[in-house]
Amino acid sequence: MNKEIFAVYPGSFDPLTNGHLDIITRASKLFSKILIAVTDNCNKKHSFSLNERLELVQESTKNLENVKVVSFSGLLADYLEQINSFVLIRGLRAISDFEYEFQMTLMNRTLNKKIETIFLIPDQSYTFLSSSMIKEVAMLGGNMSGLVPKCVAEKLEEKFPKHINNEYTK
Ligand code: COA
């Protein structure tokens, strides 16, 4: 383990999935401290508020001692300067993630040359997961087991009550 460096895992986490958790767990074994930075992605319309997303990530990672969760607004590059930390973690599920991640990495580097991004690949059983797909399945009453942490499954059920599914099938 590199004891000197702490790394930041930014994301919108709308909501956190077991795929994100897999990345967080892997990163927590590589770095002395992981800061999960929950924020808004201004290109997306989020279903959960920033505070709800923050709480779900906090609850889901409470057993990982070296993981801390915060939220921020504004540019990630500015936030990293503010906390004086320049190592980013991002997950790569498939080749299709690469282009977006590549652009984001280079934009962050252009905004602040000190930023380095490290990519981790989740377990293959999570490579198909995305937050949008989770919400779609939850909305239609699908089983969330094995896909998201328990607190996220409960929140999804609260947000998307199962009767929506029944209305579809009437
Ligand atoms: N397991 C499951 N899903 C994963 C995943 C994994 N390991 N890795 C990524 N994903 C999915 C997410 O579920 C999400 O799916 P969705 O598109 O259906 O919602 C998607 O991939 C990416 O989401 P996530 O990693 O949570 O965050 P994001 O791409 O929304 O994050 C920010 C982008 C927040 C880091 C970026 O917008 C940002 O930095 N914003 C701050 C403003 C800024 O600085 N902008 C300029 C950036 S260069």
Image (spheres, helix red, strand yellow):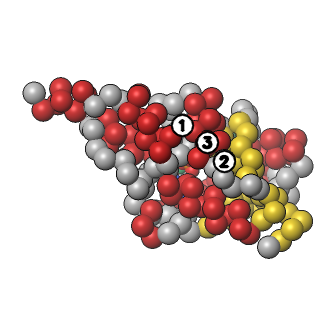
Q: Which residue is mark 3?
A: 59
- Element at label 3: helix
Which amino acid type is shown beneath numbered disc 1?
Answer: Asn
Between residue 110 and residue 105, name the one nearer to us: 105
- Element at label 2: loop
Q: Is residue 26 left or right of residue 78?
A: left
Instruction: State the residue at coordinates (64%, 49%).
Output: 61
Q: Which residue is mark 1?
A: 43
Instruction: State the residue at coordinates (50%, 57%).
Output: 19
Between residue 148 and residue 96, name the one nearer to us: 148
Please tell me whether mark 2 or mark 1 is closer to you in this view: 2
- Residue 88 visible, this orientation: yes
Instruction: State the residue at coordinates (31%, 47%).
Output: 143
**Spatial separation of the CA atoms under disc 3 and disc 1:** 26 Å
Q: Which residue is mark 2?
A: 62
- Element at label 1: loop
Residue at disc 1, CB closer than 8 Å to ligand 1: yes
Query: In this rendering, is residue 70 above or below 97?
Result: above
- Residue 132 visible, this orientation: no
Q: Earlier in the sequence, mark 3 or mark 1?
A: 1
Could you say which quadrant of the image residue 159 lies in?
top left
- Image quarter hosting the C terminus: top left
